[in-house]
Image: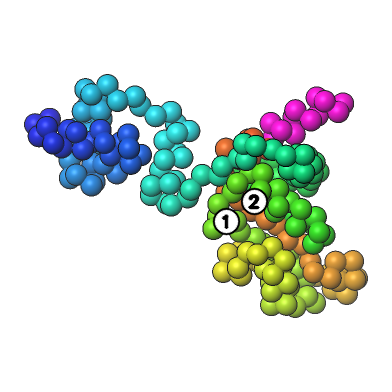
Amino acid sequence: MAISKNIQNRIAKLYVEERLSAMQIAEKLDVSNSAVCYWLAKQNVKKRSISEAVTSLNVTKFNKKPFELKKVISRVDNELKISGIMLYWGEGAKTENTVKFANSDPEMIKVFLNFLRKICGVQEERLKALIHIYPDHNEKELKLFWSKLTNIPTERFYRSHVHEGRVGTYKNKSRWGTIAINYSDKKLLNILLSWIDQYKKELT
């Protein structure tokens, strides 16, 4: 535990101000993880909760900046918020750690993305998409269509899911296939689910 006063101070600064984890600090300063934990405790630095630790690690190591909910909500904003909540209630994934909304209606997709961007304050580079298509669809054409509509570049589209064994009739029902909007953030998912629960109580 023989660490200079300067290193001790840097440990606290890196943890508190730069939000690095103990492991990241240990690697950066070339000291043991136990030494970092010891000096943080010695200097009465409050330990992060698991949720805070995960958020900090996402930001500092994986450059996953957190979303930022809009604080001041206008009447128009509130209408968009309610629309987004209702859409997710009907079509959103509820059991995973990712906000995932799938639909074949382009206008519905635009409304939900407006909700994510304007109300939830999501980080643009973390928005991803997946299209579901059938063998008789033109995958390249669909990707370009959805990319233009969503403003999500094709580089952030997952590999398309092709439903084998059905052609013709499905295309007439859904010219552009189905797109799933993905935003990997368990905290945001929990907020959306809590909003849904709130409206359930108010409306039922």
- Characterize the magenta stretch by its predominant secondary structure: helix
Residue 171 drawn at (x, y percent): 86, 71
Three-letter code for the amino acid on which mark 1 is drawn: Glu
Describe the element under mark 2 as helix, strand or loop.
Answer: helix
Q: Is residue 112 left or right of residue 36?
A: right
**Which circle's residue, 1 or 2, is located before the other in the chain?**
2
Instruction: Name the residue: 25% across, 28% down.
Output: 40
Three-letter code for the amino acid on which mark 2 is drawn: Arg
Q: Which residues are magenta?
A: 193-204
Question: Which residue position is annotated with label 2?
Answer: 117
Describe the element under mark 1 as helix, strand or loop.
Answer: helix
Q: Is residue 113 left or right of residue 6?
A: right
Q: Kindly tell me whether residue 31 is visible in this rendering.
A: yes
Query: Is the C-beta separation of discs 1 and 2 under 8 Å?
Result: yes
Q: Nearer the viewer, residue 82 or 50?
A: 82
Q: Is residue 46 magenta?
A: no
Q: How many marks?
A: 2
Q: Is residue 194 magenta?
A: yes
- How far apart, in angstroms, are the residues tagged by discs 1 and 2? 8 Å
Instruction: Name the residue: 90% across, 66% down.
Output: 173
Q: Quadrant of the C terminus?
A: top right
Residue 198 drawn at (x, y percent): 75, 28
Q: Quadrant of residue 142?
A: bottom right
Residue 135 drawn at (x, y percent): 77, 74
Residue 162 drawn at (x, y percent): 72, 68
Instruction: Name the residue: 82% across, 25% down.
Output: 202
Question: Which residue position is annotated with label 1?
Answer: 124
